[in-house]
Image (cartoon, rainbow, N blue to C red):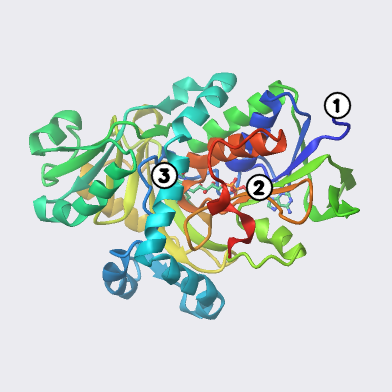
Amino acid sequence: MMQQPIVVVGAGVVGIATALQLRLAGLPVLLLDKGEPARETSYGNAGALAISDVIPLAEPGMWRKLPAWLLDPLGPLAVRWRYLPTLAPWLLRFAAASRPRQVAHLTQALAALLNRATADYEPLVAAAGIEGMWRRHGSLTLYQDAAEFGSAEAAWAEKSHHGIDWHTLHHEEVQASEPQIDPRWQCAVKVPAWSHVDDPYLFTRGLFDAFIATGGVFQQCEVTSLQEKSGMVCGVETLTHGFIAASSVVVTAGIWSDRFTRQYRYRVPLESERGYHITLPQAGIKLHHFIQCASESFVILPMANGGLRLAGTVELASRAAAPNWQRAYMLLDKARRIVGDFSTEGMTVWMGNRPSLPDTLPVIGPDPHKAGLYFCFGHGHLGLTLAATSGALLCDMILQQSASLDLAPYRLNRF
Ligand SMILES: Cc1cc2nc3c(=O)[nH]c(=O)nc-3n(C[C@H](O)[C@H](O)[C@H](O)COP(=O)(O)OP(=O)(O)OC[C@H]3O[C@@H](n4cnc5c(N)ncnc54)[C@H](O)[C@@H]3O)c2cc1C
């Protein structure tokens, strides 16, 4: 019998899914967060279980698009130039990750996680009773014409090699499956196994409620440091609740996880890929599929009652910099070119910090030098998608069950 609980630091979707997984395995768990659960990056994401995103961000084709993107301040990628010196080590590693051999290795490692993401969510969603929020309708990636699709075809073929099932829809098929889509979009790729949730915050809160209902404990407090005894982690020091003892500690603090990797002098290049959303609760547009727009690098999440969330693009800047709300508002015109006009009544904007590592893979695993300490962060664009899988893998590690896949690509000390 374990005397002390497992302490999970950070109640975003990754921490909550991990805490619930550990509870379902019968372990005592204390989840800590400096704020309310699921109010940071996990609050406003685009709600996709993006199971076909197996190719890392630093794919070779990206470099061709980069100059045009950077010249356009409202393009899919923006950099706050003053932040460039701080960002340089991350960018150099990003460039290194785009070498063909690296891309092949990273694609395989991402696919190994993404291929099981849906199955790993099933027991958590069932335990939470939130099946109704999980829409398993597939996604459509829209292309303006055959030439635009042609430039993406090699990437889709590569995805097939990694177990992703997809097929093309011609003009009439796009119109038949989504009548709201403007006829100028000539073709689309459908990924049937892609799914989305109505509202990522409510979905994540549903998992949190299940954690509490199954006997998990939540405490609002900021963790200031990890504590150890004889080379083994024994608890955490907090701002308001002093020392809290733990049998193991799992760090799931998103973009803020580097506070704890720095404590043990790991050089982990964690940076924020900031992203924006604009939510239109009364858009009055009914869509069945999750919609991706390839040329504009943004997505449309169908929410409840005809609401829409427009989200995406990347801004490389300090995690503490003031938001540039133009990056959210610019999504309105882009979306009108896809679904026509809609009501903006009650619209809200939001910005979040995607916790990103330059090779697109998260860290999932133990600290190699401190018994009882585990890290799970850096999920970038895929935190909602990979939360259940990350939790399942950590649970296996903590229970010392043999891992169902090779965990070396996700190790903490790979940088
Ligand atoms: C615009 C946008 C769209 C996105 N769309 C998608 C999508 O469609 N699909 C997808 O899979 N992903 C998407 N993502 C990415 C996804 O949202 C993130 O990867 C995910 O939310 C990260 O979750 P997390 O739990 O690691 O971090 P967070 O949600 O940020 O949670 C970390 C928690 O740790 C807490 N914390 C930090 N430090 C401490 C401390 N010292 N003590 C106590 N608590 C602490 C914080 O308060 C926070 O609650 C999107 C992101 C953005 C910005």
Disc 1 on helix, strand or loop?
Answer: loop
* Label 2 environment density (alpha carbons within 10 Å; few <14, some 14–19, many ≥20): many
Amino acid on which the number 2 mark rests in the picture: Thr
Amino acid on which the number 1 mark rests in the picture: Met
Q: Which residue is mark 1?
A: 1
Q: Residue at x 23, y 47 (%)?
A: 157
Q: Quadrant of the C terminus?
A: bottom right
Looking at the image, can residue 347 be seen? no
Amino acid on which the number 3 mark rests in the picture: Ala
Disc 3 on helix, strand or loop?
Answer: helix
Q: Residue at x 66, y 42 (%)?
A: 11
Mark pair 3, 2: CA separation: 22 Å
* Label 3 environment density (alpha carbons within 10 Å; few <14, some 14–19, many ≥20): many
Image position of 62 with respect to 299: above or below: below
For label 1, being within 8 Å of ligand 1 is answered: no
Residue 55, how many percent across, how many down? 36, 52
Label disc, if present, on residue 252 of the rendered structure: 2
For label 2, being within 8 Å of ligand 1 is answered: yes
Q: Which residue is mark 3?
A: 111
